[in-house]
Amino acid sequence: MSLLELFCHVDDFCQQFELQWQHQLLQDGTVKRWRTTQLSTSEIMTIIIHFHQTGHRNFKTYYTDHVQVHLRSEFPRLVAYNRFVELMPRVLVPLLAYLTHCQGSCTGIAFVDSTSLAVCHNRRIARHKVFAGLAARGKTSLGWFFGFKLHLVINDRGEILAFRLTPGNVDDRQPVPAMVTRLFGKLFGDRGYLSQTLFQALFEQGLELITSVRKNMKNRLLPLVDKLLLRRRVLIETVNDQLKNISQVEHSRHRSPVNFVVNVVAGLIAYCHQPKKPSLNLSRQQLQLLALEA
């Protein structure tokens, strides 16, 4: 998606959302009056999302060396970098609403997984202050980290269906029920989601949780279709890898918890706009056949 297409898509959404949002804030008494800024909400959102599409590793370098140099004609009312950073928290709610607008639809096949978002090196945990009281130590198959967990649910087309951010020490199974309330069919996860209680809770919602078993557990019989789809759980691991290495949802240069969330949400939106996503390449007829065989 080009910069112009991205701005048009974001601006069309903001024209409908922003008026309702501002009216609600004024009516609830959250704000006394709405102050306009030099850059519009859609322009701020476009710049933040576009950063994750360009492959830049550092937002300051992207803004000072690319936006302020090459995109002056597209954004004639640009502000200084420090002022732009101050404006970023204003668009957190619109970004979250826009991400919901960009999410995919349930197809009956979904994959769930979590990935770590470290906010500093392990050697600096003791003197880290930005996320004090918010981040926590956690452990993945790659080792210990200090930060948060990004929990994702995607469909067979690689489209994001739901996400949650939790401290790094939260069990992977805890946010699952709230993430899958609108899903149906089958949900595939790794051994970290093994739980009879979770299976029963999801089954009552019309969703079947399918996971592999641990080495010290008895093997169980699964339909061939479920076994094959369980092997394709690598699909969501590919999505996590792209979010970290292409969309830059993880880095250790955050100076504000709010801007950390803005960065993660914008990275998820940039992924949603990717023209090609990791996919099982299943047609509707094949999905229907899988459902019948199951």
Image (cartoon, helix red, strand yellow):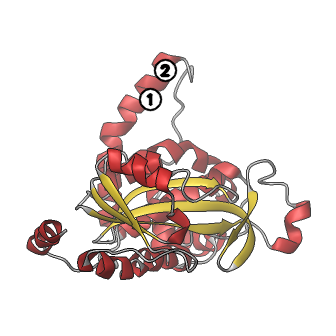
**Mark 2 secondary-structure assignment:** helix
Return the mark for residue 127: none
Outermost residue on the right side: it is 127
User: Depth check: 222 or 22 in front?
Assistant: 222
Q: Residue at x 61, y 77 (%)?
A: 57
Q: Residues within 10 Å of mark 1 (few under 14, many from 20)?
A: some
User: Depth check: 133 or 268 in front?
Assistant: 133
Q: Residues within 10 Å of mark 2 (few under 14, many from 20)?
A: few
Q: Quadrant of residue 53?
A: bottom left
Q: Residue at x 39, y 74 (%)?
A: 220
Instruction: Assign the N terminus to one quadrant of the image.
Output: bottom left
Instruction: Assign the C terminus to one quadrant of the image.
Output: bottom left
- Answer yes or no: is residue 164 visible: yes
Residue 170 locus on image (x, y percent): 65, 55
Return the mark for residue 22: 1
Q: Residue at x 36, y 30 (%)?
A: 20
Residue 278 locus on image (x, y percent): 34, 79
**What kind of residue is marked 1?**
Gln
Residue 178 to residue 286: above or below: above
Q: Quadrant of residue 9?
A: bottom left
Residue 105 to residue 33: above or below: below
Residue 226 to residue 31: above or below: below
- Answer yes or no: is residue 40 visible: no
Q: Is residue 279 left or right of residue 258?
A: left
Residue 75 locus on image (x, y percent): 45, 59
User: Depth check: 75 or 14 in front?
Assistant: 14
Outermost residue on the left side: it is 285
Return the mark for residue 26: 2
**Mark 1 secondary-structure assignment:** helix
**What kind of residue is marked 2?**
Leu
Q: Is residue 66 left or right of residue 153?
A: right
Q: Are marks 1 and 2 in contact (CB under 8 Å)?
A: yes
